[in-house]
Amino acid sequence: MAHIKNRLRGLLAAFVALVAALAIVPGVAQAEPTPWTGSETKTITVSNLQPGDVVTLYKVADVQLNGDNTTTLVIQTGFEQSTVDAYLDAAGSETAQDVWGDRGDATPFGNAATVQDGQTSVTFSNIDAGLYLVDVVPADESVTYQPTIVAMSPVAVDGTTDWTFDDAYIDLKKTTETLDKKITGGAVEFEQNGGELGYAMVGDEVTFQVTFEINANQSEFVLTDTMSTGLTFTGAEDVVLYKNGQPVSAEGVYAVTGNEGAQSFTVTFDTDWLQEKNTNGTSVNAGTYTIEYKGLITPAATLDGVTNKVTSTNNTEGDTVTVDFVGFDIVKYGDANKNNTYEEGEDLLTGAEFALYYDEECKHAVYKKDGTTQVTLQTVNGEASTDADTLLKPGTYYLKETAAPSGYQIVINPIEIKVTTEGGTFYIPNVASTDHEGIELPTTGGMGTVALTAAGVVLVAGAAAFIVRSRKEN
């Protein structure tokens, strides 16, 4: 606020009578005031805005030109003389907000202007000398603009009775809580829930995106990211800043503090870059930005999922997203009715064993979070479930039966299962049931072998006898 007042006082110095004594009331003038007759008009450009913002000008005071070539400010209807006086007085505590609060039934000066898509400023034309108050109704409720008074101050041209003044360029101050975090890659289901929740597996790299606002006249801006246990930062090389969809080089703009494997890091923006101004004094780099970076899901993750929180200089409460995991259940049963549908009362089979794969050919096994133990399930009373060390994301998987329950043949073909965000329960019938308790096959050297050998000897002897007898008869 101080810099606005300093600038305003500098501009008001051009008011000959006002600089001398801040003489705002008509009684201070040396002669009877006459209306400002200057035909010259200028523009007021208001910047540091966002598309959809609605900007309105109110004329707080008019300028009257006196017969002795001095000026007097005349407060307009709807504003309080005492409030404006106090605002112009450097020792006063009133601010533009107080002036705005006392506006009463003030009438807007001209039509309101709406910031168009892709723009960050609006310009008002045909502005004559005076004091103007800028009010903004933000399109984004998280943004609050500071009411600002603009002095369009006429300056006497030396050696003449002419007056002139300049165009005004105003970078509005604003406070914003804009800080929106999303999951944009490496985890499924992020599109369906706005990116606030995703699903992944251990070893996945998840891409996070944060949208934030850098305000004009901001001298400090820091983003701080914190990852929960089971999620680590992949490193500064994966941090990319964008403005209007275009990448912004990190050199001279920001620095990342935090190494690969860390669970927190900061992005600190350069002060000189933040305060860079163009020739008309408006901020060069204020605006909306996005930044992307990656986190790695590690074996330390649990079924509770992992979280990632970001805070900023402008928003200390921050925004959080979650990466979650899913599991599933199977039920193995004896399909007595041969209809591939589980019906209550059918046998629930113990002893079926399955291995989990990503592909139907069962060449790519799914491993537990330790990365070395393949995911397997064994049924007890027909039921089996993935455990706390099996952290899956939704998708299509294949179960290959590696051991069948007693009395049942093994399922030869892989069983496709589609695991959703809710997990799932999959009923698996027996295939090619023997319909009895199984057959005890003969073992090498056992009684079964002797019996078969004896039978063979008998058959061979009978055949030989038959051949001999046939020859004799012939």
Image: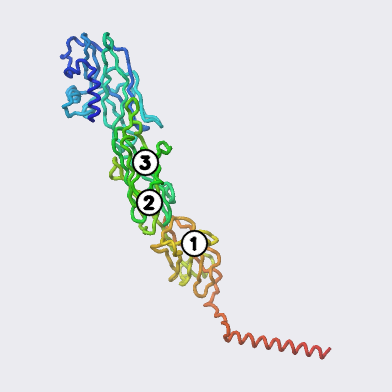
Percent x, y for residue 417?
49, 60
| Circle nearer the viewer, 3 or 2 | 2
Marks 3/2: CA distance?
Answer: 23 Å
Sequence-wise, the earlier of marks 3 and 1 is: 3
Spot the residue most to the front: 251
Numbered badge on residue 365: 1
Q: In the rendered view, tell whether residue 459 sits above or below residue 293.
A: below
Q: In the rendered view, tell whether residue 44 sits above or below residue 295.
A: above
Tag 2 near tag 1, CB within 8 Å: no
How packed mark 2 is, by other alpha carbons closer than 10 Å (few <14, some 14-19, many 20 or more), is: some
* Residue ID at (53%, 65%): 339
Sequence-wise, the earlier of marks 3 and 2 is: 3
Tag 3 near tag 1, CB within 8 Å: no
Percent x, y for residue 67?
21, 8
Marks 3/1: CA distance?
Answer: 38 Å
Q: Nearer the viewer, residue 42 or 442?
A: 42
Q: Quadrant of residue 300?
A: bottom left
Q: Nearer the viewer, residue 397 or 23?
A: 23
| Circle nearer the viewer, 2 or 1 | 2
Spot the residue most to the right: 474
Residue 330 in sight = no
Query: Amino acid type of disc 2?
Result: Glu
Query: Amino acid type of disc 1?
Result: Ala
Marks 2/1: CA distance?
Answer: 28 Å
Residue 428 in sight = yes
SS for callout 2: loop
Disc 3: which residue = 211
Q: If the image is split into quadrants, where does the N terminus sit?
A: top left
Disc 2: which residue = 260
